[in-house]
Amino acid sequence: MNIGIDKIGFYTPKDYIDIVELAKARDVDPNKFTIGIGQDKQAVPRPYEDAVTMAASSADSILTEADKASLGLLIVGTESSVDESKSTAAFLMDLLELPEDIRSFEIKQACYGATAGLQTAYDFVSQNPDKKALVIATDIARYGIKTPGEVTQGAGSVAMIVSQNPRVLKLNYKSVYMTKNVGDFWRPTFSKTAFARGKYSNEIYVDFFKTLWEKYQTKYSATIDDFSTLLFHIPYTKMGTKALRTLEGKIPDDKYAELTEHYQQSIKFSREVGNLYTGSLYLGLLSYLINGARSGEELLMFSYGSGAVGELYSAEIQKDFASGIVSENVLKMLNERKKMSISDYEKIYQIEYQNGTIVDPEAVESKFYLSEIKDNERLYKKNK
Ligand code: CAA
């Protein structure tokens, strides 16, 4: 049975900051941010947006009534969840008007969460072929104002429906993975912002990729010629570039040139949005599907979540992949965003809603929003 991604939806907030303006405000050479880090814009969520509202928006962009009726599983991968007990998935039940006879939960393992969700969804559909699973990656990446990690922030969500006979991507179920206890990135429960040993994280990420590629070749007698595209976890686009470069000189030059060209197509959206944490690999997939993919291509996908878990798996682009993504809507959303000044971004960044907050619906620009915090409980609404 063929199982994989049948549809992909995406959401990113309506405001962004320009990375050159950020560099100037931080007294940094803009080339460091645009070339050295590899980013152009960074999404800025409003205070009434969070992991729940963004997840609702990305899923809402693809779910039909027929999808809802056949859903058996909902998994949300996030490391910016709003509650230590209740899952983001439970909040979505009302917002998305989902039927109650589904299994739902949240997965956290840094940026690996969505991949864990996807592999779990594969197993679920293989056992329940008439059912579908909804896997959502949703995160707000925050390191703090004037920190080294500030340029690698971002926000957004990617939703994927997993089913049999998928239109977009068949998961080949060829996969290698590894876990190590590593202190490269962490966010204690008291902190809204992450702590990172950024350069160390880069080293571990590249080491994981090299180890997993060796393992993959051995396990499946594979060679680089089996793939035309490598997609990477891209919290900022230079990170994936570093992993790709480990192949330079080790594979034929024309193959390396092909992989590099396809990689450039896969990072277009990330350059525009920034870090989605666990959604980053899947934003790269969406970018590639819209900007360069051909049906029948074999992809190798590298997922990495600090702490650290890595997985390298293969997938095949399907004949009708374009019908499972609404390209016009994705491009419209990206193109219609508004640029925010660095000073406004700094002000918005500091706003933290407290118990008793009631949000003015007139000021809300997104479809789903945090409407109130009452008795420390977050309540959400959908704009009609
Ligand atoms: N023109 C062009 N390039 C320039 C330049 C200029 N004027 N000045 C500097 N550069 C280049 C540097 O040469 C360097 O390139 P290389 O990495 O290829 O050598 C690059 O710009 C960055 O320069 P620095 O290393 O000096 O920059 P920095 O000290 O400010 O740190 C960073 C950069 C480490 C990425 C930092 O932004 C950071 O720590 N970010 C957070 C990173 C992080 O958290 N990573 C975790 C990723 S894994 C993950 O996604 C986490 C998860 O699971 C949740």
Image: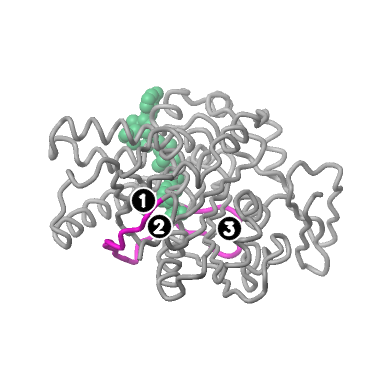
Q: Quadrant of residue 306?
A: bottom left
Asked whether 354 or 362 is in front, the reply is: 362
Please tell me how many numbered marks the rendered image carries: 3
Task: Report crowding for label 3: few under 14, some 14 to 19, many 20 or more residues within 10 A (C-alpha).
Answer: many
Q: Is residue 340 left or right of residue 23?
A: right
Residue 269 x %, y %: 49, 36
Kindly identify the amino acid type of the residue bearing the numbered disc 1: Ser
Q: Is mark 1 within 8 Å of ligand 1?
A: yes
- Looking at the image, residue 345 lies above or below residue 78: above
Q: Earlier in the sequence, mark 1 or mark 2?
A: 1
Residue drawn at x 42%, y 64% is 116
Q: Earlier in the sequence, mark 3 or mark 1?
A: 3
The residue tagged with tag 3: helix, strand or loop?
loop
Residue at which label 1 appears: 201
Kindly identify the amino acid type of the residue bearing the numbered disc 2: Ser
Task: Report crowding for label 2: few under 14, some 14 to 19, many 20 or more residues within 10 A (C-alpha).
Answer: many
Residue at which label 3 appears: 80
Kindly identify the amino acid type of the residue bearing the numbered disc 3: Ser
Residue at which label 2 appears: 306
Q: In this view, does 120 lie to the left or right of 146?
A: left
The residue tagged with tag 2: helix, strand or loop?
loop
Asked whether 129 or 203 is in front, the reply is: 129
Q: Is mark 2 within 8 Å of ligand 1?
A: yes
Residue 284 x %, y %: 43, 43
Residue 183 x %, y %: 38, 60
